[in-house]
Amino acid sequence: MRGLFRKEKGLCEGRKLRIKTKWVPYAMLLPAFVLVCVFKIYPVISSFSDGFTYNGAFSLQTYKNLIADSTFWNSLWVTIKFNLICIPLQVFIAFILAMLANTTLKGIGIFRTIFYLPYAVSLTVATMIWSLMFNYNNGVLNSILKLLGVGAQGFLTDSKQALLCIIAIASWKGCGYWMMFLLAGLKNIDSGIYEAARIDGAGFFDTVFKITLPLLKKMLLFVCVANTSSNILLFAPMQLVTEGGPKGSTNVLMYEAYKSAFKYADRSRSAAIVTVLLGIIILVAAFQFLVLGNDNEDEKGKKKRRKA
């Protein structure tokens, strides 16, 4: 009887211990969950609701005013133009850097560090350094152009060049970061595939376009979408050196939302612009999941045909 009692007592204690330990993971995740809710989810919900508030009541007037605002459409066009140039440029350079960093040359680790180093520099610091280089009177770039017999360029003060200068700053800062993702994707490609291609007589460009890019497709899609989300929300360089000018040539939507909230104290307009940006990001993310889902379905179909 004593043995049976001890056994039952041990089972009860074991159940209590399992019940206690069951909630330990949730308790450890709770602080992070609360922070995400407070600083991520709540601002999104609040911004969405503020966009439909006008003079303290629910209304679509804010969006009507936004549609009729030429500044909004100019900012939207600048945002699209910025991303259409910046994203392909960054992805292309990141891919080239990843290909170089994926070689087995001696000391390649040093070059990987150099390629990644710009990302470790604060965006504010990087922007100020580049603004000094772009300076019309004392900038390094204009000094070099003068030595070459080329006239001084306006760069950040020229409405035709300012956005390109911002793209140069963003690309210098971000290419090394996206390179690391593509390098990880290249490392996952079996080297035996390249050896088989060489035996079959495939050249460098055949290998890149027929092996590397198809096998790197998912990582490239992730980089494109993540890079788009990052660049859509970028406005620090515009705020620091151009303030959206000259002539609105660098006035992206995110900076317009910032000005609406903190300069003009128009919270509803800022929230509406942010909602538009959120919608753009969701559409791009949906495109990624759509493409990845199709790829997964194709792979499942191939496996089923092989089994059959």
Image (cartoon, helix red, strand yellow):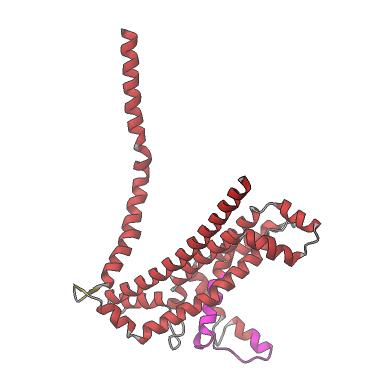
- Residue 245 left/right relative to 204: left
Magenta span contains residue 108: no
Position of 64 with respect to 79 (left or right) is left
Residue 51 percent location from the top left of the image:
28, 72
Horizontal arrangement in the rendering, residue 123 relative to residue 117 (left or right)? left
The chief SS type of the magenta part is helix
> What number of labels is visible?
0
139, above or below 10, in the image: below
Magenta segment? 144-172
In the picture, measured across the screen, residue 133 lies left or right of residue 50, that is: right
Q: To which quarter of the image does residue 182 belong?
A: bottom right
Query: Can you tell which quarter of the image residue 242 is in?
Result: bottom left
Residue 157 in sight in this render: yes
Closer-to-camera residue (95/265): 95
Name the foreground residue: 168 vs 210: 210
Residue at image coords 55%, 87% = 137
- The x and y percentages for residue 28 are 37, 43
Q: Is residue 33 above or below residue 263?
A: above
